[in-house]
Each structure stands twice: as C-alpha cells, then as structure tokens.
Image (tube, rainbow, N blue to C red):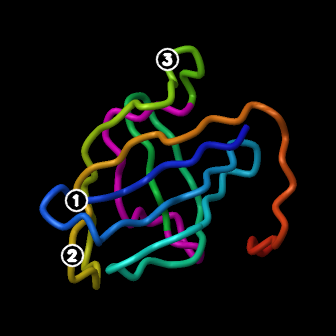
Amino acid sequence: MRITIKLDQPADPDAFAVLWVDLELHHWSREMHSGVDIPSWGLLRTAPSATFICDPDSADALCTLTGLDLDDRIRLIEGQFGHVVWHGESNLKVRLDRWHVQCIESDSIEAENEVFDE
C-alpha cells in the first residue's frame, strides 16, 4: 500500500514536503519539497494514533504525525489530517505543522527510482 502525505504550514503556503509512505517496507521518501530541507528518505514507525517519520540511519523520530494510525487501515482515508510534532534539533527554518493524506493506493506500486538502501 502506498500513501502520499503532504506536510505544510497555513502561514506559509510555499513551504511544504510531500512524502510517499510504503507500509510494506516501513520506509518513506520525500517526493517533493519547497522551502524546507528534510532527508530524502527514512524509516517509518507506527503506534496507536501516531506515525513516526524517522531518520534513515536510526530509529530516532524526526517528527510525529499525531492522529495518523497507519495500522488502522479501516479508518485511514484520503483527506484525513492532523498535527506534526518535530523532535530534537531539527534544522528546519520553517516548521511544517500539519499533515494531510493526499492519496491512498492499495495496489502494489514499483517506484521508478528506488531510493531506499537495503
């Protein structure tokens, strides 16, 4: 299953990041971004009512998408939204503070350019 999630900030519509989430591999990749600099990919952890976007080199969360439970596939819908909580010493000049699910594709999709290290 592939999920596309947009992180943004109402105060600055030019700052955003679009993440592609692979639930089978528990990875994410940055598909597009503007006005912010986050890693190009990383690991994904889930918990009830939260999703953790983690650094590619560790299980340390860069941010938490509160209210996004990727393990609850029944309640996962396009248009769902919530708050982003950033952790640690992020080097973001603009803090993207909300997320929303743009697209859910239940078919298995092969990425054209695989960025994940195995």
User: Where residue 49 appears, x then y in whole percent?
Assistant: 38, 30
Q: Residue 62 appears in which quarter of the rendering?
A: bottom left
The quarter holding residue 93 reads: bottom left
* Residue picked out by circle 1: 9
Q: Is residue 23 left or right of residue 100?
A: right
Q: Say what amino acid the circle numbered 2 marks.
A: Val
Task: Quadrant for residue 85, please give it.
Answer: bottom left
Instruction: Kindly identify the amino acid type of the residue bearing the numbered disc 1.
Output: Gln
Residue under the point 18% across and 67% down: 12
Q: Residues within 10 Å of mark 3 (few under 14, many from 20)?
A: few
Query: What quarter of the picture does the N terminus occupy?
Result: top right
Q: Position of residue 115 (x, y in %)?
A: 75, 74
Per the image, label 1 sits on a secondary structure element best described as loop
- Please name the residue that numbered disc 3 is placed on: 75
- Secondary structure at badge 2 equals loop
Q: Nearer the viewer, residue 85 or 31?
A: 31
Above or below for 77 versus 30: above
Magenta part of the chain = 55-70
Q: Is residue 106 left or right of residue 108?
A: left
Task: Give the residue drawn at x 54%, y 33%.
Answer: 70
State the image coordinates of residue 63 (x, y, percent, origin top left): 35, 60
Q: For this rendering, which residue is in front, 60 or 14?
A: 14
Q: Amino acid at mark 3?
A: Arg
The location of residue 88, given as percent across then percent down, is: 26, 73
Residue 96 included in the magenta stretch of the image: no
